[in-house]
Amino acid sequence: MSRYDQKGPEPATRTLDTATGLSRKGLPQGTVGVLGALVIGISVCAPAYTLTASVGPAASEVGYQTPAIFLVGFIPMLLVALGYRALNSAMPDSGTSFTWATRAFGPWIGWMAGWGLIAATVLVLSNLAGIAVEFLFQSLSIVFGDPGIADIAENRFVNILVCLGFMALATFISYRGMTSTKVFQYVTVFFQMAVMVWFVIAMFVGAANPLNEAGQMPELSWFNPFEVPSFSALAAGVAVSIFVYWGWDTVLTMGEETKPSKGRLSTESKAAMILVVILVVLYVGTAAATVAYAGLGETGTGLMNPAIAENVFAALAHPVMGPFAILLSLAILVSAMASINSTAISPARTLLAMSHYEALPAALKKVHPKYKSPHVALLLSSIVASVFYAVMRFLSEDVLWDTITALGMMVCFYYGITALASPWYFRKSAVKEGIGAIISKIVLPLIGGVVLLVVFVQTTVDSMNPEFGSGSNIGGIGLVGIIGIVVLGLGVVLMFIQARKSPDFFRGKVLPRADASTDTSAMPVFDDGLDG
């Protein structure tokens, strides 16, 4: 049952919640249903973009077991999803990982969980824009029949300039609020999903074509993770595969904006669970089709060819789809563009929540009076992502590959903390509810959280090797490892600075630590002044 008072058919005013200490932040209510949330979730995950950016790095780590690694990556994500669902039902809040980890573990761990989410989304926003730039010029080269146009994307200054243009456009769309965002997503999502299904079927057909020397039919061993040669390769592959599933939790950040649900599950929880199922079927199927069609050769369209690793579908589009290759290029282009737009929802709402609960400067909690979007937080995350991409373009020749791997590390970090928040928060109440609650709220999220944190630690250690990822390094230390350490280190520094400026949050006075069985009826409530 919802923690908020719902009255009448119209989107009800959600009263301030004295049971959890959570409160409204000025976001519009009752504007998104299950289908709308599902569409936005698919848009954030961006299957067309995600797969072209991840299949190459995954294949370079685990070879023929690429489908298996996508399947394995789904398992901890499913376990984490159960924890997310339980936490969201108990504490619907746009701060998600930040809010839940703070309530379970206290302000310091909660702050770092929020930082991990923000860092991950900044990394992926920069990567999305980079992919969009490449496919913009590739689409133009196909339209005008001039392969040289695609090479323009290699010019760093042109690349960065166009990237900034994409970021500005997507930020403007998100700035106008969730309703305009939802409308924009419907067209792009249905288009990219239709093209992806076509592309996958065409790859399976092409794999069986005798003229395709690299083609072969999928084998059961491709789906067996125990065939992966080492734990380090498995951890690296899982980190990449987790990236492909990352983003579904954006649906849960809209808990304050979704329509009331008639069933036991909230609207956003229903959408999140449907989304996870759709993703695993599509991703594992696409991975198998790509390996079957392209093989693991080190030249041409082979998946072990480092020249195509960070953008596999760009190399496969024409061989697989012939004259219809333009559709795949456009699908990936709009996929990346739509995902820039919808991905910005998550960090902006996390920044909003952190500011609202005094964990970040008050300026970030401003909500636009007309569009009801957290415009200051949105602008900040877009600017940081743009600067990060520009810097990375000069540090790495394979910026997309390296940011994907670093992103996987950040996702493992904050997902792991969030998953562990579920068993700790429900440790007393679940026992009273019965065996079903113990399994779904404690045991399974605990396993998922531990697995993700182990993968995070292993990948972080391995990423220090200069040969890790694309092989980019600074002073003999892997660039991916440097990104991970610098990003987390920056979070620690900012946390201590904020602790000096806003001690109440870090003393547990604003968002107190509690568990699901605690009587918190006397907990203070923080009104943002937007309830009228």
Image: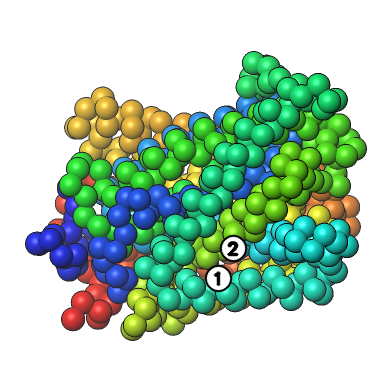
| Quarter location, residue 507 | bottom left
The residue pinned by badge 2 equals 337
The amino acid at mark 1 is: Ala
The amino acid at mark 2 is: Met
- Does dot 1 land on a helix, a strand or a loop? helix
In this rendering, would 304 be left or right of 410? right
Label 2–label 1 contact, CB within 8 A? yes
Residue under the image location 36 percent in, 72 percent down: 356
Up-down relation of residue 511 to residue 514 (above or below):
below
In this rendering, would 329 be left or right of 3? right
Residue 322 x/y as whole percent = 75, 43
Which quadrant does the C terminus fall into?
bottom left
Q: Give the residue at the far top of this rendering.
A: 220
Crowd around label 1: few <14 · some 14–19 · many ≥20 (10 Å) = many
Residue 509 x/y as whole percent = 31, 67
What's the colour scheme? rainbow
The residue pinned by badge 1 equals 170
Q: CA distance from mark 2 to mark 1?
A: 7 Å
